[in-house]
Image: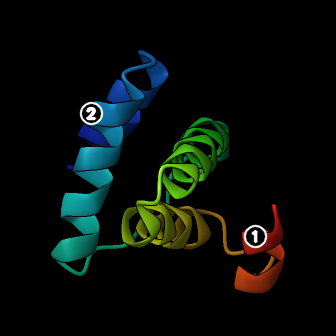
Amino acid sequence: MLKEGQTLAKEEKLAEAIDKFKQVENLGGSLDIDPEVGKLVVDFLLEQGDTLGKEGELKESLQNYNLAKKINPELPAFDADAWAQG
């Protein structure tokens, strides 16, 4: 599934790729993916998470951020107060 997700991401089918990565995560698998693919996916997750947050979908927004953080552990810690201030 991880390889399938990476292939989908390279084809810019990011939503489908993220579904695969979520499946891997739910099965307890490693999200050790190609750095180039990881950047595409993380950028998409953060953008999507920001949009969800602005729409009041806070749980989904945070889930996106958490998945992005698992893919790229070097992301800064989530600061809910700073995020809420906009």
| The quadrant where residue 16 appears | top left
Residue at 73% x, 72% y: name it: 84
Give 68 or 81, whichever is nearer the viewer.
81
**Along the line of sight, the residue nearer the viewer: 65 or 84:** 84
Report helix, strand or loop for mark 1.
helix
Q: Is residue 62 above or below residue 7?
A: below
Q: Amino acid at mark 2?
A: Glu
Tell me the residue that label 1 is attached to. Answer: 83
Image point (51%, 73%), residue name: 66
| Distance in Å between CA atoms under marks 1 and 2 | 27 Å
Counting residues from the start of the chain, the first of labels 1 and 2 encountered is: 2
Residue 16 circle label? 2
Instruction: Name the amino acid type tagged 1.
Output: Trp
Identify the residue shown where x is 41% and y is 60%. Answer: 57
Asked whether residue 75 appears in the rendered view, the answer is: no
Horizontal and vertical percent for residue 69? 60, 71
**What quarter of the picture does the C terminus occupy?**
bottom right
